Structures are given as structure tokens and as C-alpha cells.
Amino acid sequence: MDTLKRAYVAGGCFWGIEELFRKQPGILNTEVGYIGGDNDYPTYGNHPGHAEGIEIEYDASVTSFKNILDYFFRVHNPTTVNRQGNDKGASYRSAIFFQNEDELKIAKEVIAMVDNSKRWETKVVTTLEPYSTFWPAEAEHQDYLFKNPNGYTCHFERFGTYIKE
């Protein structure tokens, strides 16, 4: 499929982000893992510098990178440094891992939309980081909230779309 694309984001505990994205139009697959850190083959107990991230596989004929980022900013708090809900530390940072200059440009545009919306009391602190190797998390973390519907999450839809077209 030539419209198959992947996006990489981190917005706190990867369980909640994954569960919300899996239900969105055009999303074909999600996988949680570690990205942006210092070691190869990170694990839940050893992932220095890595964010708990998600790989989002999508059909670009149904959705776009811009729409994915719009939803990303609607389901987590992008104004807290290294924190989401009760989770604290660099693992829980808000980050977009761009794969090319076009994605970087779109990320900057969406961040400007979020900031200009004034929906948050402070500015977006989401980092824009070049894509690095995405390391899938252990099996018990994949589809965690699907398998454990009452498990912990601090993610939910907070707002409607930021995109005004």
C-alpha cells in the first residue's frame, strides 16, 4: 500500500495514547515502545532518555499527519514538562519524533494552532525531536488497556479539533 505511513509521538504513559489512537479513522495499527533515548534494546526497567512512545501506522488516503497531531494534542496535556497525570520523568515527556522536514513543518504549524487556541493556560512544551530507532515495548505493554479495560490511564479527549479549514 503506497499510502501506508507511520508517525511517532510520546505523550505520557503509552497505554492511554495507544488505546485512544487505535479507534481513530485511518489508523491501521499501533505499537507502544521506547524512542529518543540513550541505549539500544531498552526495556521498561532500563530505558534512559527514552520516552514512552507510540508508533502509529496509518492510511494517508484516510487521515493525515496533521490530523494525527491534532488528535495527539487533544488527548494529553502538552503544557507540562516531563509529566502526564501522576507520571513524572523524561519518559513521560510530550514529544513529536519527525521523520522529515515536511513533518517538522506540520508539527510547528499544529503547535502554533494549539498555542493560538488559548485552550491551555500556558504554552505547549512538546519537544520536536528527529526520529530515532523505535524499540517496541515488551508484550505485556502492547494493547494493555484493550486487554485490561480498567487499567490506569490519564488520557482522554479534552477538546474538539484545533484545525480550522
Image: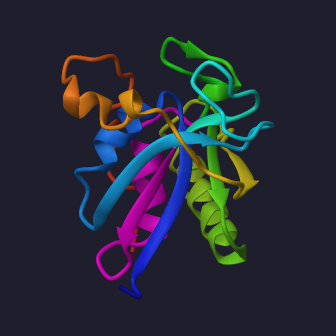
Confirm whether the magenta stretch covers residue 58.
yes
The image quadrant that residue 163 belongs to is: bottom left
**119 displayed left or right of 39:** left
Q: Is residue 139 visible?
A: yes
Q: Do we see residue 80 in this rendering?
A: no
Q: At 48% from the left edge and 57% from the top edge, which residue is drawn? A: 69
Task: Say whether residue 161 is magenta.
Answer: no
Question: Residue 62: image x %, image y %?
Answer: 29, 76
- Left or right: 139 in relation to 132: left
At x 39%, y 34%, the residue is: 139
Left or right of 22 on screen, residue 80 = right
Q: Quick one: quadrant of the C terminus?
A: bottom left
> Which of these two is toward me, 25 or 43?
43
User: Furthest residue to the top?
Assistant: 86
Here the colouring is rainbow
Residue range in magenta is 54-78
- Where is residue 18, by image quadrant? top left
Depth check, front residue: 19 or 126 = 19
| Count of numbered badges drawn on the protein | 0
- Vertical side of 19 occupied by 45: above or below: above
Where residue 87 appears, as percent x and y from the top left, is 54, 16
What residue appears at the point 47 percent right and 46 percent down from the top-left corner?
73
The N terminus lies in which quarter of the figure?
Answer: bottom left
Q: Residue at x 49, y 66 (%)?
A: 6
Please state which of residues 21 and 133 is positioned toward the viewer in this rendering. Answer: 133
Return the residue found at the far bottom: 2
Q: Give coordinates of residue 33: x percent, y percent.
A: 53, 40
Left or right, residue 77 beside residue 60: right
Please say if 70 is above or below 109: above
Figure check: 119 above or below 128: above
